[in-house]
Amino acid sequence: MGKPILLSTPHMGDRELEFIKEAFDTNWIAPVGPHIEAFEQEFSQVVGTSHAAAVSSGTAALHLALRLVGVEAGDEVFCSTLTFIATANPITYLGAKPVFIDSDRTSWNMHPDLLRKALDWRAQFGKLPKAVVLVHIYGQSANVEPILEACNHYEIPLIEDAAEALGATYRGQSPGTFGKIGIYSFNGNKIITTSGGGMLVSEDSELVSKARFLATQARDPAPHYQHSEIGYNYRLSNVLAGIGRGQLLVLSDRVAARRHNFEVYQKFLGNLPGIEFMPEAPFGQATRWLTCLTINPVVFGADREQIRLSLAQKQIEARPVWKPLHLQPLFAGCERIGGEVAQDLFERGLCLPSGSNLTTEDLERVIKAITEIHAFTDTLP
C-alpha cells in the first residue's frame, strides 16, 4: 500500500537549522531578538509592504487587525464564507457579529458584486459594517480592486486574510498588501512554515507599532510592569523567526513545486469526465497551495465523499473544500449574503495532496487511485 501521502506537510530546507543554531548560540530564545526583526524586514521586502509584525499565528494577526481598525462588541463585520473558521473566530473574540458573503466562480473568493450590493443596501439604513475581511483561499487572490473600491467608497477598512496566499499575485502585487491591514500564516501546512506563526502587514507604521505593543501584553513604557489596556501574548519567538527566515529563502521554489503538482494532476486527471479543477483567475497567478477540484457525481460515477474515502483506504489524504461558515453550527443564525456557490463548491469540492515535497511516485499513486475509481464505476451496470 505504501507510505501515507498527506495533504500538505512541512518542507524544510538547509538554512533553517543555521538560523536556529544562531539563536541558541546567542541565547535569543524569548519572543524578542534579531531574527524577529530580520524576518519582519525580509518578509516586507518579499511581499512589497513597508511594515510587518511577526506574531504567534495568523489567527492572532487577524485578531490584532480587527482590534486595530476599531471593531468592538455589537459591531458587524462582513466576511468571506468559503474559508477556514479561523477567519471568523477573531470577530467573535471582540463580541462582534460576522455577516457572510458568498463566492464567485472565477476565483472561489468573495463575490465583488454581492459585497457592493450589500454595502449599498446597508448604507440606506445606516447599518454599514465596521470592517470587511476578505480571504484569498487555496493560494489564489480574490478580485481585490472592485472590493477595495466598494470599501473605500464607504470608508470601511479592508482586512485581507492572505493566510493561504503567500507567493500569489494580483495584477503583479501580493495579495494582503492592498487593504488597511493584511495577515499571513506560517502554520505547519502552509506554503512556508515556522511551525506556528503569522505576520501582520500594513503601510501604516503606527498600526504595526500598536500591533507589536498589543502582542506583548500591552506593557506601558515604565521601569515596572504597568498596563493601561488589554494586551495579548502574541509575539513570535526568535527561534521560530529563524525558521521563517530560512523558509522565506525558498518561497519561490515552494510555489513552483506546488504549481507543478497541479499541472501534473491536470494533465492526467483533467480529461476524466465530471472533474473540473479550481480555475486560475485571469487577474493574477495562484500558488496552487492546494490543488482543488470539483466532481460532478452523475458524470464521474462517484461523489466527492466516495472518492475521499476510497483514497483514504489507500493511505492518501484528501479533504473536502472548506465548509462555508454560514453552514457551521457555531454561526447558525448569522446573516449571509448569497451562499449557494460556496455550498456547491463544498459539496462537490476535494483538495488533493499538494505538498511541495511530494515525489513523482506520490503523484502517480494519487492519479492512479482516482483513475481506478472512475474506471471501476464506469464498468458498473
Image: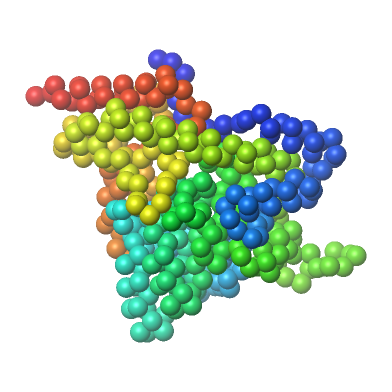
In the image, residue 69 lies at what x, y percent? 58, 71
Residue sitting farthest toward the top? 1
Residue 45 sits above or below residue 76 on the image? above
User: Residue 223, located in which quarter of the rendered image?
Assistant: bottom right
User: Residue 67, located in which quarter of the rendered image?
Assistant: bottom right
- Tell me which residue sits at (58%, 55%) in the image: 48
Residue 367 sits above or below residue 50 on the image? above
- Tell me which residue sits at (74%, 36%) in the image: 19
- Tell me which residue sits at (39%, 24%) in the image: 363
Would residue 23 be visible to someone looking at this image? yes
Q: How many marks?
A: 0
Residue sitting farthest toward the right? 223
Would residue 86 be visible to someone looking at this image? no
Residue sitting farthest toward the left? 381
Q: How is the image coloured?
A: rainbow
In the image, residue 339 lies at what x, y percent? 30, 59
Residue 117 sits above or below residue 63 on the image? below
The quadrant of the rendering that contains the N terminus is top left
User: Residue 52, located in which quarter of the rendered image?
Assistant: bottom right
Residue sitting farthest toward the bottom? 125
Direction from residue 284 to residue 232 in the image, left or right: right
In the image, residue 210 lies at what x, y percent? 69, 66
- Tell me which residue sits at (57%, 52%) in the image: 47
In the image, residue 225 lies at what x, y percent? 85, 64
Direction from residue 313 to residue 229 in the image, left or right: right
Direction from residue 165 to residue 150 in the image, left or right: left
The quadrant of the rendering that contains the C terminus is top left
